[in-house]
Image (tube, helix red, strand yellow):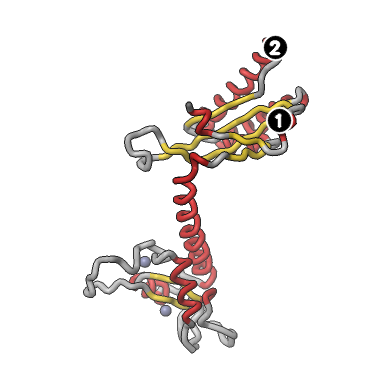
Amino acid sequence: MAISDKARKFLWAKSGNRCAICKTELITNEDKSSDFNIGEECHIISSKPNGPRHIHGLKEYDNFENLILLCRNHHKQIDELTDTYTEEILRYIKANHENWVRSTITNAIEDTSQNEKPRFLAQVTSGKELFNIINEAHGYRTDYDEVKDEEEMNYIAGIIQSFVDYGDISGMVEAYDKVRMAYDLQKLLDELDEKGFMVFADRGLEPMFSENPRSSKWTVATILLKKKENPEIIKVEFNGKEDAK
Ligand SMILES: [Zn+2]
Ligand SMILES: [Zn+2]
């Protein structure tokens, strides 16, 4: 049996032309026939009785699920070190690599169109969830509905300040305190709920303000406090670009 064209196409496409272990590019523009690093379609489970990770009697050995794309060095390594590169480990590496290829390309596409696209924030009701959003964020974008009086203004200002403070110190505290902070945030969320506010939040990577926007990114937590009577509450649109003006 040989590997079908279909399985081969799948494997190369989903692997993004890169070795699943070292991520080296397999087919390159450089026409150096000397190093011939074109990548190898390797079997996770060998069909040969004394082959690597052999399992007897599989219906199919040459399907996409049983193949992993590797550079020559890593093919050699997985077939020699079969105690390290077990079937389970290879399946994990394969799945991880294919997800990485997919999400890297998807992110790159979204990145370029991000500014035109409004973001939809999800409602946050759990302190732990909110903690994960603000945890070690580098920046914050906050917004809230019109406040009705000075008392409410003070309250909202205090809440927003607390969220930002928690986020700022989250990177410096021990695991124990992180659990505590999530618990405290839960209490704040419950209090907000009682006072008629809903919290929407999201965390994303955004380019830092620098000459080359691609050079570095930082994590920005977006937090929005909405009043419950607000009719547009089902889906909250938050356009980051407008806010940055
Ligand atoms: Zn490799
Ligand atoms: Zn092999």
> In the rendered structure, are the residues bearing label 2 and label 1 in contact, judged by CB atoms less than 8 Å apart?
no
Please tell me which residue lies in front, 40 or 14: 14
Q: Which element is circle 2 on? A: loop
- Quarter of the image for residue 164 reads top right
Question: What residue did someone put label 1 on?
Answer: 198
Question: What residue did someone put label 2 on?
Answer: 149
Amino acid type at image mark 2 = Asp
> Residue at (41%, 64%) from the top-left corner?
21
Is 152 located above or below residue 95 in the figure? above
> How busy is the neighbourhood of tag 1: few (under 14 within 10 Å), some, or many (20 plus)?
many
> Residue at (77%, 27%) from the top-left corner?
229
> How busy is the neighbourhood of tag 2: few (under 14 within 10 Å), some, or many (20 plus)?
few
Q: Which element is circle 1 on? A: strand
Residue 193 percent coordinates (x, y): 75, 28
Residue 64 percent coordinates (x, y): 52, 75
Please tell me which residue lies in front, 244 or 168: 244
Q: CA distance from mark 2 to mark 1?
A: 18 Å
